[in-house]
Image (tube, rainbow, N blue to C red):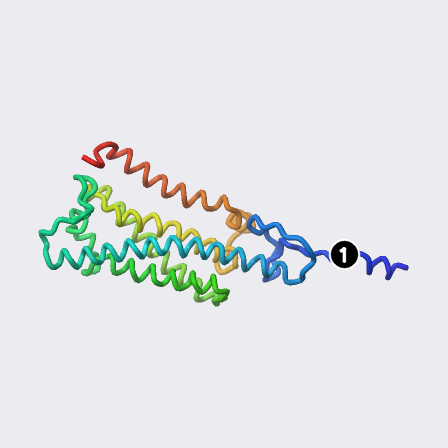
Amino acid sequence: MDEQARDLDPPVVDVGADVDGDTDDLDELEVDGDDPDLEHASSVVWRRRTALEMLVSGLFGLWAAFVLSIDAWLLALNPKRDMSCNISEVIACGKVADAWQARLLTFPNAFLGIFFESVVLTVSIALIAGVVFPRWFMRGVQALYTVALFFALWLFSQSYFVIHALCPWCLLITFTTILVWAGLTRINIRDGHIASTPALRRFIVTSTYWYLAIAACAVIVGMILGKYGSSLMD
């Protein structure tokens, strides 16, 4: 009789379990049924969605880097050329391009942007396709793009505090770098490539995590508006 009762009990699937056996909240996934592959499938969906967000941001960043690299090439041919994004005293790509900070490694920074964005786009596409990279590789990508993040923020600080001019394309790269770094960090913490506390991990897998990246972009916008205001277009 007890054996028959046990046979009638439905199997229990822990949808909050990771593929590595750790329990954790999944990102806004509602699943039903008793499929033994359920948790693996939900993890793949989560990773693909985050990688898609990285891909979109990275494409915008790559586009901006290409525009800047073309402008750098045209300026090398004609240093007196007036750039189309020289809109005002503040929005002045030419002023930024003429500064030494725009060629930190003796060549235009836009070439570095193309390199960084190409790496993250390749990784994003592979993740969307279901590729699972080893821990050392994902840690390497995290370290590389962390360098890109600090570099982008340093360039913004130089434009804001030292050069006193802004480049719209550079700002776009700054914003996209923040968003891509946020997505990459989310995946690496979620998959256990980067050590974290259970509380941090639970926070990372929720959509509220993206509010931090959006808030960082909003701070930059607030700094620009607070310093220049209506003079942006004068």
Going 43% across and 53% down the picture, which residue do you hit? 53
Q: Which residue is mark 1?
A: 10
- Residue 230 to residue 125: above or below: above
Q: Report the amino acid beneath label 1.
A: Pro
Q: Is residue 4 left or right of residue 218?
A: right
Density class for disc 1 (Cα within 10 Å; few <14, some 14-19, many ≥20) is few
x, y percent for residue 105 = 21, 60
Residue 36 position by quadrant: bottom right
Going 42% across and 55% down the picture, which residue do you hit? 54
x, y percent for residue 70 = 21, 58
In this orientation, which residue lies closer to the viewer: 79 or 25?
Answer: 79
Quadrant into which the N terminus falls: bottom right
Going 26% across and 49% down the picture, which residue do you hit? 169
- Residue 14 to residue 91: above or below: below
x, y percent for residue 193 = 49, 60
Quadrant into which the C terminus falls: top left
**Element class at badge 1:** loop
Q: How many marks overall?
A: 1
Q: Is residue 222 left or right of residue 92?
A: right
x, y percent for residue 57 = 38, 53
Going 25% across and 57% down the picture, which residue do you hit? 110
